[in-house]
Amino acid sequence: MAKEELIQFEGLVTEILPDARYRVQLDAGHEIVAYTAGKMKKNRIKTLAGDRVTIEMSPYDLEKGRLIFRHKDERPNPGAPRGGPPRGGQFRRR
């Protein structure tokens, strides 16, 4: 017997809940509770409020989902260093 086909939706994380759960507002307008998928935990991918995410849901329970992907922001990281290597070459002076 085959597994039931899962449904994927995109949404926005609105609130972080205890036990690695998130309240997500789907693009369709529904609000659900989602938990972090195992691969995201394994790779230590952090999700914050305001992040765009992809949710996987079972057709039997449309109130819960599994957060499987966090979309990258289009804006640059303000804390990232600019340019190439640090001044003075690759070796550190003692």
Image (cartoon, grey):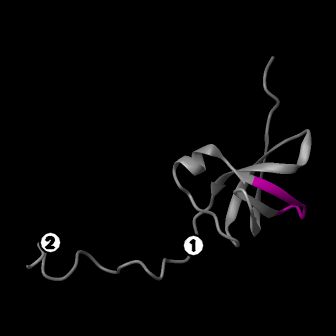
Residue 31 colored in magenta in the image: yes
Main SS class of the magenta portion in the image: strand
Above/below status of 18 relative to 7: below
In the rendered image, which residue does mark 1 sit on? 74
Q: Please state which of residues 47 and 75 is positioned toward the viewer in this rendering.
A: 47
* Pointer 1 with pointer 2, Cβ within 8 A: no
> What residue is drawn where x is 69% and y is 60%?
53
Residue lying farthest to the front in this orientation:
18
Sequence order check: which comes first, mark 1 or mark 2? Answer: 1
Q: Please state which of residues 19 and 87 is positioned toward the viewer in this rendering.
A: 19
Q: Answer with left or right where residue 25 lies relative to residue 72.
A: right
In the rendered image, which residue does mark 2 sit on? 90
Could you say whether the residue bearing mark 1 is in a helix, strand or loop? loop
> What residue is drawn where x is 58% and y is 50%?
41
Could you say whether the residue bearing mark 2 is in a helix, strand or loop? loop
Q: What's drawn in magenta, residue-wise? A: 25-34
Badge 1 density bin: few <14, some 14–19, many ≥20, Cα 10 Å:
few
Question: In which quarter of the view is residue 87 placed?
Answer: bottom left
